[in-house]
Image (tube, coloured by chain):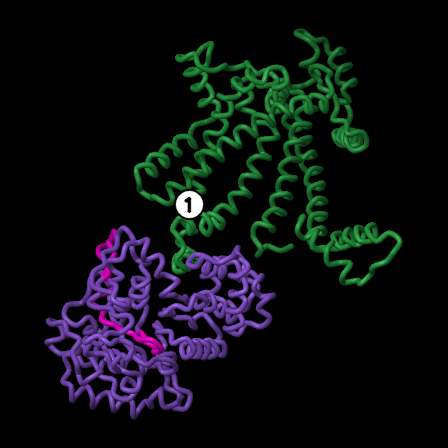
Amino acid sequence: MTTENHESVGTAPRAQGSGGGPLPALGRAFRGLANFVNSSLFRYVVRRILWGVVLLVIVSALTFIIFYLFPSADPARLRAGRNPNPAAVAAIRHSLNLDKPVYLQYWLYMKNLVLHFDLGFSYYNQQAVRTQIFQRLPVTAELALGAFVLWMLIGIPIGIISAIRPRSVLDRMTMSGSLVAISAPVYWLGLVALFLFAKDIGIIHLLPGSGSYVAITKDPGAWFGSMILPWFVLAASFAAFYARMVRAQVRETMSEDFIRTARAKGLSERRVIFRHGLRAALTPVVTMAGLDLSGLLGGAILTETVFNIPGVGRYAYDAIVNADFPPIQGTVLFSAFFIITANIIVDVIYAFLDPRVRY
Amino acid sequence: MPSSTHASATSDSVQVSSLLEIHDLHVSFRTRDGDVHAVEGAELSVDRGSTLGIVGESGSGKSVTALTVMGLTRFPNATISGEIIFEGTDLVKLPNNQMQSVRGKRIAMIFQDPLSSLHPLFKIGWQIVEAIQAHEDVSKATARKRAIEALREVGIPSPEKRIDSYPHELSGGMRQRAMIAMALVLKPDVLIADEPTTALDVTVQAQILDLIRRLKDEYQTAIVMITHDLGVIAELADEVAVMYAGRVMERTSRERLFTVPELPYTWGLMRSIPRLDAPRPGRLDSIAGLPPSLIHLPSGCPFHPRCPYVMDVCLKVEPKLEQSEPGHLVACHLQVEERRRLGRELVSQHGSRSDER
């Protein structure tokens, strides 16, 4: 985005030939902005954002419909205590607006969301969903970003090395190991990790286990220790998947004609691989990485639950267990928002990574 | 070399030697299905300022021969033997790091499809500058100036603008010109062109061939032109080698090839050229059958299953590449007189391509 923008800022005044207005800098800036607004990239981004909004409305409506068609439990009855009398249940139902028709409930929800950015209150503990999500978002982001860094640092180098040395010992070991990591469910892997390494229940009392989360602002050292196991558990399957994907990408790229050309130019094999090969092979990986990271920002439900980390995923899990609709809807919307936004950002970035892509 | 038709003036040693000579080159690749014998005893040579045309079907070993000269077939599953003598050095035995300084600098190569052969994500100027800086210790600015000059040289209009284009922004002909500029910017002694016009429009093909010929005359570059198109041979080659199943089966000058071709396989290639001035036949003549598997070659002469003149001896004994007359080598069991008669007959019936040009 920036290069295109700068280019248009730079060329606009020369094209117009204007020099001595009273506010030339402002005029130039304005014309640059006008150029950008007229650019195809800008129109593309605006179009994508409008579609993103439409998509969010559809997602919210679907969540609504699913919850009302197949509720996990009756929220009013859940709130009414152990042996509820029907009058109390009806009163609660009325106070939560649950006695109104579904379309009206949806309308009220959307009105509050759009006008006041109000995601409602938990049926379970009356807390504002928006506040809860914003409190928990940093925790989820810490988990997601840490795991992201970890899986990129593990997956990409392994993928590259196995691609360059196919059928080597390292290639065979990492590729069969990655199959295991991909196949292992996160909750199982999490429990195994706790069983092996947790300070309280582990065979080796090595790392803080489940429920040990401390805010980074309170005690950075303790925070880091408590995140190590969750980071590795969450990163494991991603690292394995990325290793395999990078390996396939690099192998395919290294058989391309332009790699033969690079060798024919007399470049060193190192330069052929790292400059010519990886530049082409890793470009699609950027797309995948952006989307995977954004998917996790909506909450890593299983990891957060196994390690009892107070993030958005844990919040969503509790809400589902308690048939607490407003937090479910809120976390789903946030998750969808991150994925849609990341899609747009990744597509724009791709246009700069690959000059053949134009909007 | 006795087979060389014109004595090289550049060498003052007793033995007359060419700039690049290939002797008894064998290249095979181990695969799951068996060993692929891609090149079997190839004998070739090329001199400064002249063009060697290598012609043959797909899988005849022409590209593998060229890539082996570049040292680009040194895969773990490859077995390479024989000699590739370039200015007195055997490239087959040259270690990888020294081969790297020959590649691109002394011997350059251009490929069939310029779109897939240029890196899609780098500007063409960047790719040419990289080639210069790989071999010469010059500044980026100097290299860029030379890249612009090279682009101008190959006929790319406004090269100072085009240098910042990506390959996909150029037409097919311009891309191949950029490719040639990249190969010639270091003034190599040998340029290997592997089907450089196959992926291009017919009108552009002629321009590219003209360009290669002009550059050859200007810089006295030795050209190895690999093609399946006898038209390209007629246009450009001084010497011709016809390859089949990894073997050089006929070698002679262009004039001789288009007047007295002596190999049944060459006749087949000539017959399969469509002609505009002759009455249109029902279907084009083609060589019956398919090129042989390079894993399980036919016994005797590898061409015998497709040869209309096959004899008993062809099934048992592989013909050697022997001198038919000075400067004309043929690997065929047919009697010399018979071969010449049939070859002349074919040329008189079918017309000679080199006459047309």
Chain A: colour as depicted: green
Give left or right: position of A347 versus B205: right
- Which residue is at a point 77% across and 27% down the rendered structure image? A118
Q: Is residue B36 visible?
A: no
Point out residue B215 in the picture as x, y percentages from the top left corner: 44, 76
Residues rendered magenta in the picture: B27-54
Give left or right: position of B319 versus A148: left
Q: Nearer the viewer, residue A216 or B21?
A: B21
Of all residues, the one furthest to the bottom in this rendering is B348
For label 1, the residue is A248
Q: Nearer the viewer, residue B101 or A246?
A: B101
Which chain corresponds to the colour purple?
A: B
Of all residues, the one furthest to the front in this rendering is B12
Point out residue B294 in the picture as x, y percentages from the top left corner: 24, 63
- Which residue is at a point 83% across and 50% down the rendered structure image? A26
SS for callout 1: helix
Quick check: B192 above or below A123? Answer: below
Looking at the figure, which quarter contains the N terminus of chain B? bottom left
- Which residue is at a point 31% across and 71% down the rendered structure image? B57
In the image, is residue B41 part of the stretch drawn in magenta? Answer: yes
